[in-house]
Image (tube, rainbow, N blue to C red):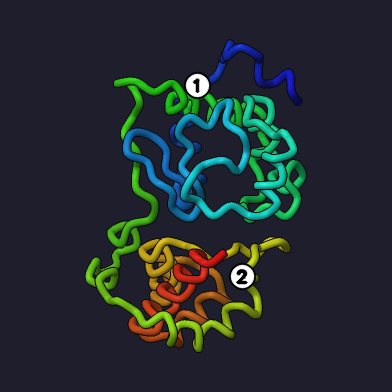
Amino acid sequence: MLALVPAGGAWSADAERGKALYAQCKRCHQVGDGAAHRIGPHLNDVFGRAAGSLEGFRYSPAMKAAGAGGLVWTAAALDGFLSEPRALVPRSRMSYAGMKDDSDRADLLAWLRLSSAGGPDRPAAEPTATPEEYGLDPQLLTIRGDPDYGAYLAGECTTCHRPDGGEEGIPAITGWPHDDFVIALQAYKRGKRVHPAMQLVAGRLSDEEIAALAAHFRRAGDEP
């Protein structure tokens, strides 16, 4: 597998095709000029960086331990992680199942490398999910929820979503940015995203209750 990603950056891969494949990542990660942490950390300058080392992002204990143990995001390590994330870092919060095709991973990594070079040619970061993408009213993002009320409502969420991470294939929702949380639940509520259990749960929630849950889980992510 390691031979699929040549050392020294000798890429025979299609970065433009990799940009299209990055659509699988952009729900959680930003990359490019102006990128910020969202559900996942930003991916600027990821090549050569120690795992779990960016300031300001709440990594899982597993990812921090991997970095402390010497995991560095070389091209080969990134290739392995993209192939099967929890094989390389067990108990990672990253719920993505993996990109199995070798050429797909090579093309995606060629695209990501463009944002590890820096300089004026670094492409601009794209937003994560937006209200317009799902046909939602942007005013839904202006509702400020009560985090204490959200804590009261959260019991149904935490029967599946573990506050300390989604270790069994269920994504962690603790620490999500407010807007990403609201957009996801509103999209389920309105049938714009399809998942029977999530549509059932979200369909019972008012707009104010969704905002309260977003405030609660965001606050929970700020706690040690």
Q: What residue type is disc 2 on?
A: Pro
The quarter holding residue 139 reads bottom left
**Numbered disc total:** 2
| Tag 1 and tag 2, C-beta contact below 8 Å | no
Q: Is residue 3 left or right of residue 48?
A: right
Residue 6, percent across and down?
66, 15
Looking at the figure, which quarter contains the N terminus? top right
**Residue 162 x, y percent position in the rendering:** 65, 71
Q: CA distance from mark 1 to mark 2?
A: 38 Å
| Residue at mark 2 | 163
x 40%, y 79%: residue: 210
Q: Residue at x 65, y 75 (%)?
A: 160
Residue at the image position 34 percent from the left and 29 percent from the top? 123
At which x and y percent is residue 92? 68, 52
Residue 8's x, y, as percent? Answer: 61, 12
Judge by depth and name the residue closer to the eye, 16 or 209: 209
Q: Secondary structure at mark 1?
A: loop
Secondary structure of the residue carrying tag 2 is loop
Q: In the rendered structure, find residue 14 and report the number of the disc placed on it.
A: 1
| Residue 33 location, quadrant | top left
Q: Residue at x 49, y 64 (%)?
A: 222
The quadrant in which the C terminus is found is bottom right
110 versus 178 height, above or below:
above
The dot on residue 202 is: none
Classed neighbour count for the residue bearing mark 2: other residues with Cα under 10 Å, few (<14), some (14–19), many (≥20): some
From the viewer's perspective, tell me whether residue 33 is left or right of residue 169: left
* Relative to 24, residue 160 above or below: below
The amino acid on which the numbered mark 1 sits, given as a three-letter code, is: Asp
Within 10 Å of the Cα at label 1, are there few (<14), some (14-19), or many (20+) other Cα atoms?
some
Identity of the residue furthest to the front in this view: 224
Mark 1 / mark 2, whichever is N-terminal: 1
